[in-house]
Image (cartoon, grey):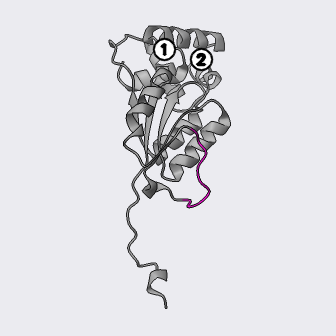
Amino acid sequence: MNPAATDNAPVAARRRPRCLLVAADELRTAFDRERGRRAVVQTSWDLPVSPWDLAGADMLCVAAVTSAADGDALVRAVARGVDVIVAVDDAVPAAVRRDLHRLADVTVTLPVVERVDLSADQRQILELLGEGASLPEVADSLYLSLRTAERRLSGAKRLLGVRSTAEALVAVAAGR
């Protein structure tokens, strides 16, 4: 019997990939900062077909998620062990955000700003959206009309100084 084929052989622990979420206007800066430190840095989600496990390749993908296909490619890259830097915007669906937190060590970087006092409703809406609920689901669970939920979300984004819901979720998670 081949000793390498036994189930009792120790398996080396696999390093969790790192995922850095940045504001869209910081993506280029993050790319420039990492370019000289890595063996492979690329600006797309196109990965080599082989080998499947890229954890040891010291690879980094730096790109934005602009479509559902990009979100799927992002999750595949992280599942394969690739570190990623991703521009945060509304194109990153809740399911993709959940998968990222499940598969990688996620870090969020945003410019430091003063803490903003959001209303309890605004914080609750953002909390539920961060858990993966859609805005209509949030409105239903809080007994609000969809239009009222939209207005409160819009007001929260305005107070936080961000344009997208994803940026607002990141800002609240970062303690603004």
Residue at figure coordinates x 59%, y 14% from the top left: 149
- The answer to whether residue 6 is visible is no
Q: Position of residue 101 (x, y in %)?
A: 46, 41
In the image, residue 15 above or below residue 162: below
Locate residue 55: give its quadrant: bottom left
Q: Is residue 35 left or right of residue 52?
A: left
* Circles 2, 1 touching at the beta carbon (< 8 Å): no
Element on which disc 2 rests = loop
- The answer to whether residue 148 is visible is yes
Q: Which mark is in front, 2 or 1? A: 1
Element on which disc 1 rests = loop
Q: Position of residue 126 (x, y in %)?
A: 49, 21
In the image, residue 108 above or below residue 122: below
Locate residue 116: give its quadrant: top left
> Which residue position holds label 1?
162
* Residue 20 vs residue 38, the one in the foreground: 38
Q: Amino acid at mark 2?
A: Tyr
The magenta stretch spans residue 146:
no
Circle nearer the N terminus (2, 1): 2
Locate residue 20: give its quadrant: top left
> Which residue position holds label 2?
143
Residue at the front extreme?
A: 36
* Residue 175 vs residue 68, the one in the foreground: 68
Q: Position of residue 75 (x, y in %)?
A: 56, 44
Q: Amino acid at mark 1?
A: Val
Label number found at residue 151: none
In the image, residue 128 above or below residue 161: below
Q: Identify the magenta region.
A: 44-52
Residue at figure coordinates x 60%, y 13% from the top left: 150
